[in-house]
Image (cartoon, grey):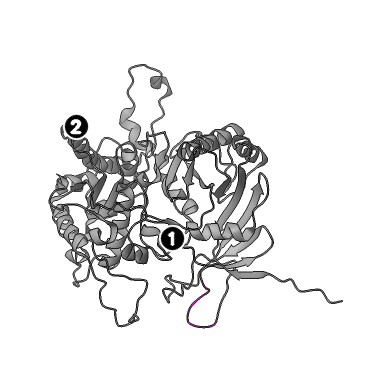
Amino acid sequence: MKFSEPSLLVEHLSEPDLDFRFGQKSHHPKDGLFLYGPHKGSKKLKDVRIGVVATARGMKLFRSWSQRLLDGIKVPPPGPREKEDRLHLADFLGLEETFGITFDPTGCSELQIDESQIDRATRILNKHEAVDEVAQIYIDRVQKFRRNEERSIDVWLFIVPEMVYERCRPESKRTGLDLVEGKASKKQKTRTAMPLFETLPDFDTSVENIFDDVPDFRRRIKAEFLSIAPTQILRETTLDPYAFLNSAGYPIRKAQDGATIAWNIATGLYYKSQPKPPWRLSAVRDGVCYIGMVYKNLPNNRDNHVCCAAQMFLTEGDGVVFRGANGPWKTDEYEYHLSADAAEQLLRQVIETYEDLHDRPPKELFIHGQTSFNDAEWNAFCKAAPPGTNVIGVRIKPTTGDAKVFRDGDYPVIRGTALHLDDRNAYLWTSGYVPQLDTYVGPETPNPLFITILRAKYERPALTSVLNDIMGLTKINYNSCNFNDGLPVTVRFAKMVGDILVMGSAKEGSPQPFRFYV
């Protein structure tokens, strides 16, 4: 008896177009910005008000690098093992020429801090206390400026010495450092349980607020500034790698070429200071809204509660982050589920904000996540959505080698290749060889995303339509200027947003623009 062999559909999805100024389109952000300028860019040159917090050395590096950013930075010549035509790299022609914005490197609000003070703070015995002390040096300097100066700042730049990066992250070891005594013991990582004293009205436990935060300088700064302004944290070694050499005469860290760094920082600066993002997706259907679900365990929470949030992305590329309720949402090692009330409340926040922006509810609301939805939470999502709004749940899971596709030649599978397993499930290669760039930017054979359409309130959309949407969402990371990312923006930044929201210092509870988190 002969059985019929299964036949699987393989298709290639076209590269999504991006919109730029004058109604022009391009696949690559760098091409579109260079040729046409930002989508919704102003006719007049716009000044960006920048505040800089740095050591004396960091300030000097910033001024020098800022002038290069304004003048333009060329891609360095190819190395001995590189191709002559490296189409994934591009000269940066200058901030004004590319983005239509500018700033005066000598006219920024410069707040100088003492490097020796930072060094001492990083050596405090307890890491939570050390990181908090370092962050507070920067925060106090900004708060003093805000009290005494009337000038408003669009974006705050924090130029940090390498010691902050090396010593102020959760995985920092600080091996070989001479540590100094602080207020907390070296091993303390959580609040001290004192139930009898905590009931007293004048008993102050604020000194232990540092244990509500993860000891991470970046997350601490981002959390503190949610209610102030967008921020950008730059290492001194990023601005000038060749100012920091090892004993062999090479830079102490390998950084991207100067032009690529300029493209990325300039894109972030534009996104964080201007009303609209520098580009948007061209072929987004009218009335579509994408939501990325975020779950993150609260640090040192005695009840093992989880923070839940949602990232909303609209047709213009704008992003808004909504903070949901904390609760016992973790139901398994890798599964998270909201209660019906929490799910309904969170989605109502999203829809109300959409209605405020568009004067009508969305027609299609896609919920992206890496877990499934149980009946109670899904029914609550559908209840929160008004009649006529189709809610679609999509699971997007990165894979680690369970599916591989190979092709003849020197390069791997083409980006945009989709392998359909049925009408709900597919593998999608969002990373791979890009013909326009004539290269694959990656270290190994690319792994696909596993996409599943889980549920729909009304009619289930075609799988190819969902895959095309995900391809588009890999192109709206405004914190860099890459051709694409491997993950859609709804999933890529979920961990980053969650990491900030669970910080005890993240006191801002209202919906916040996504630019504050990146």
> How far across and how far down the image is residue 147, in percent?
19, 32
> How far across and how far down the image is residue 359, in percent?
49, 37
Whether residue 46 sits left or right of residue 372 in the image: it is left
Whether residue 173 is visible: no
Is residue 276 inside the magenta stretch? no
Q: Which residue is mark 2?
A: 147
Q: Which residue is mark 1?
A: 18
**How many numbered dots are placed on residues in this image?**
2
Mark 2 falls on what kind of element? Answer: helix
Comparing marks 1 and 2, which lies closer to the viewer? 1
Q: Nearer the viewer, residue 489 or 53?
A: 489
Q: If you read the primary sequence from the N terminus, does the residue marked by circle 1 or circle 2 appear first?
A: 1
Mark 1 falls on what kind of element? Answer: strand
The quadrant in which residue 99 appears is bottom left
Vertical comparison of 17 with 312: above or below: below
For image coordinates 34% across by 51% down, the residue present is: 271
Disc 1, disc 2: CB below 8 Å? no
Q: Quadrant of the N terminus?
A: bottom right
What is the three-letter code of the residue carrying label 2? Arg
Whether residue 461 is visible: yes
Q: Circle 2: is it few (<14), some (14-19), or many (20+) Cα within 10 Å?
A: few
- Residues under labels 1 and 2: Cα distance? 42 Å
Q: What is the span of residues highlighted in magenta in the rendered image?
A: 408-414
What secondary structure characterizes most of the magenta part? Answer: loop
> How far across and how far down the image is residue 478, in percent?
38, 55
Q: Nearer the viewer, residue 301 or 487?
A: 487
Is residue 410 inside the magenta stretch? yes
Q: Residue furthest right?
A: 1
